Image (cartoon, rainbow, N blue to C red):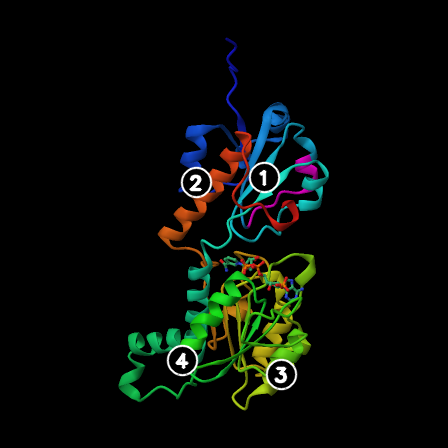
Amino acid sequence: MSVDPSPTSVLAVARLSPLLMPQLAASFDLEVLPDLDAAALAAVAPRIRGIAASGDSKVPADLIAQLPALEVISVMGVGYDGVDVAAAKARGVMVTHTPDVLNDDVADLALGLMLSAARQLPAADRFVRSGDWLKGNMPLARKMSGARLGIVGMGRIGQAIALRAQAFGMSIAYTARSAKPGLPHRYLPSAAALAAESDFLVVITPGGAGTRHLINAEVLAALGRSSPAGGILVNVARGSVVDEAALIDALERGVIAGAGLDVFEDEPRVPERLRALPQVVLTPHVGSATQGTRQAMADLAFANLQLHLGGQAVRTPVPECR
Ligand code: NAP
């Protein structure tokens, strides 16, 4: 009986979640890209059959081209805009991601950012801690219940946000590439048209070239004009979807009233001008960052890799690879 002496080699393109790395190291011959120089990568490249990546990772065409035995790229995250899927597909490489298991957490955070920006929760916290309360009351905030919510991107997470917003009595409209006839909410054909009828505009599309700067100065101006108190923008999608310079300008000039942002154009660098604005609530890309959800994402990313390398069908291929 012949036994293959070489374990399957997998390349982690970044230092990935501690919930995933031990599983990978226990099952595969694991190489970690940040630890390899060009010569070391060239030496292991011929035997790499799988790539493990996070939603923030870059898997460019030139890396794929360097790995002749590559069969599968498994992303621990639903967004895979860092992967050159066209290059992978051209080589017959499967790409997988981890949809659905994070819908609740990202939707929860979106509602949290909406409430935080509307009711100024971080400022209220600072007000109590600083002792300013002893000198008088905080300025009045604005009401979220019953307001108009516009959702840019009505996919898995967008629909989970809508479900939660219904409990706040909000009227809900959305935009996407196409209308969803099965949903009870109003469809508008563009982000600008939606912003013009929204008090809160929540962005939850994929990143990448197709949505780059979808939220621009024109959309922000429409959001600002839409309500006397000025609109609030929440971005839990990708930093690239919002023109950050236009957003800072709109906030500084009072075109819109506030923002809640989990994602930024050049993470983890956040412009000083944005950090200086008290009407902005900032979180460090933590949409899916709870223990249970990150565990479920790690388990699904690992299962996809193991299934494909074991010759079985993966659970969650990206749409382009279905
Ligand atoms: P999804 O089910 O694929 O939904 C994406 C939605 O965006 C769809 O409704 C799609 O429209 C719409 N869309 C795509 N391109 C568009 C465009 N150019 N203009 C307008 N709408 C467009 O994805 P999901 O699972 O909800 O996840 C959405 C994104 O959230 C991910 O790709 C990721 O970038 C981000 N995310 C962020 C975090 C975080 O930590 N902050 C966590 C998880 C996910 P159609 O339905 O018409 O195709």
- 229 relative position to 196: left or right: left
> Which quadrant contains ligand 1?
bottom right
Q: Quadrant of residue 216?
A: bottom right
Give the SS element for disc 2.
loop
Distance CA(mark 1)–CA(mark 2): 14 Å
User: Magenta part of the protein: which range?
Assistant: 56-64
Q: Secondary structure at mark 4?
A: helix
Q: Name the outermost residue toward the bottom.
A: 228
Residue 175 relative to residue 27: left or right: right
Q: CA distance from mark 1 to mark 4?
A: 42 Å
Q: Describe the element under mark 1 as helix, strand or loop.
A: strand
- Point out residue 111 in the picture as x, y percentages from the top left corner: 44, 71
Circle on res. 119: 4
The residue labelled by disc 3 is 196
In the image, what residue occupies the spot 36% across and 51% down?
292
The answer as to whether callout 2 falls within 8 Å of ligand 1 is no
Q: Amino acid at mark 2?
A: Leu
Label 4: how many Cα within 10 Å (few below 14, some 14–19, many 20+): some
Q: Counting residues from the N terminus, which is met first, the one under dot 1 or under dot 4? A: 1
Q: Is mark 3 within 8 Å of ligand 1?
A: no
Residue at position x 65%, y 37% from top?
Answer: 93
> What residue does disc 1 label?
73
